[in-house]
Image: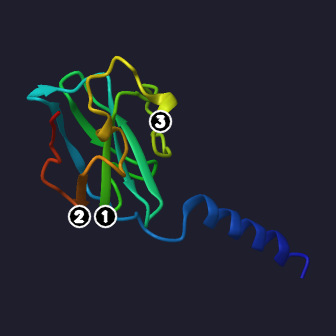
């Protein structure tokens, strides 16, 4: 019996480190955000799926483009997402932040992005992510 305990601990640790299943399905999510026809810069896009407990915030590039990824994979888990565009940016690192909805403290008062787009609840923007390749999720913001 004493020999079984270290083997059991080692087995549990191995499963915790490697996982007990394969890779989770993900849908490739990329696109471009424009406002009145111009690329949105110095901002981030937020994808939120409350049912799945997923909220991801991604910086927009200098041309308004983005590619979403989670800590598990490039892309997002399949499902329906509410989307927001917020003037705040997350730190530019290789780490993928999982975030809550933006708060008023995150907002840039000089932003030209209309306030309704700052929250997934009020933006009216949505994305239906399917596993594998998806068409670009381009969002055109208007005043």
x 69%, y 63%: residue? 13
Residues 123 and 26: in front is: 123
Q: Does 108 appear above or below 95?
A: above
Q: How many marks?
A: 3
Q: Quadrant of residue 76?
A: bottom left
CA gap, disc 3 to disc 2? 24 Å
Asked which secondary structure carries label 3, the reply is loop
Residue drawn 73% across the image and 66% down it: 10
Mark 1 vs mark 3: give the one in front. Answer: 1
Residue position marked by numbered label 1 in the rendering: 78
- Within-10-Å neighbours for mark 3: few <14, some 14–19, many 20+: few
In whole angstroms, how far apart are the C-alphas of marks 1 and 3? 21 Å
The label shown at residue 130 is 2
The numbered mark, 1 or 3, whose residue comes first in the sequence reads 1
Q: Earlier in the sequence, mark 2 or mark 1?
A: 1
Element carrying mark 1: loop
Q: Which residue is mark 3?
A: 95
Helix, strand or loop at label 2? It is loop
Task: Work out which residue is located at the far right of the displayed protein and give it.
Answer: 2
Vertical position of residue 91 compared to residue 45: above or below: above
Residue 134, horizontal then vertical, whole percent: 17, 56
Task: Give percent across and percent down for residue 119.
Answer: 37, 44
Looking at the rendered image, the disc whose residue lies closer to the viewer, 3 or 2, is 2
Q: Nearer the viewer, residue 34 or 104?
A: 104
Asked if residue 102 lies left or right of residue 60, the reply is right
- Identify the image's colour scheme: rainbow, by chain, secondary structure or one colour: rainbow
The answer to the question of whether label 2 and label 1 lie on touching residues, with beta carbons closer than 8 A, is yes
> Considering only vertical position in the picture, is 82 above or below 67?
below
**Cα distance in 3D space between marks 2 and 1:** 5 Å
Measured as percent of width and height from the top left, residue 15 is found at: 62, 67
Point 23% across, 21% down: residue: 62
Q: Position of residue 104 (x, y in %)?
A: 48, 33
């Amino acid at each position: 019996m004493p020999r079984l305990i270290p083997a059991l601990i080692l087995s549990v640790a191995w499963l915790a480190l490697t996982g007990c299943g394969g890779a989770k399905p993900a849908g490739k999510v990329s696109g471009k955000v424009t406002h009145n026809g111009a690329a949105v810069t110095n901002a981030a896009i937020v994808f939120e799926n409350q049912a799945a407990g997923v909220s991801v915030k991604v910086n927009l590039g200098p041309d308004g483009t983005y590619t979403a990824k989670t800590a598990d994979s490039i892309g997002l888990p399949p499902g329906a997402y509410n989307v927001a565009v917020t003037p705040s940016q997350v730190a530019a690192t290789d780490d993928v932040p999982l975030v809550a909805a933006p708060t008023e403290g995150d907002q840039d008062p000089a932003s030209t992005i209309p306030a309704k787009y700052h929250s997934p609840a009020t933006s009216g923007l949505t994305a239906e992510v399917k596993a594998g390749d998806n068409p670009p999720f381009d969002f055109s913001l208007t005043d």
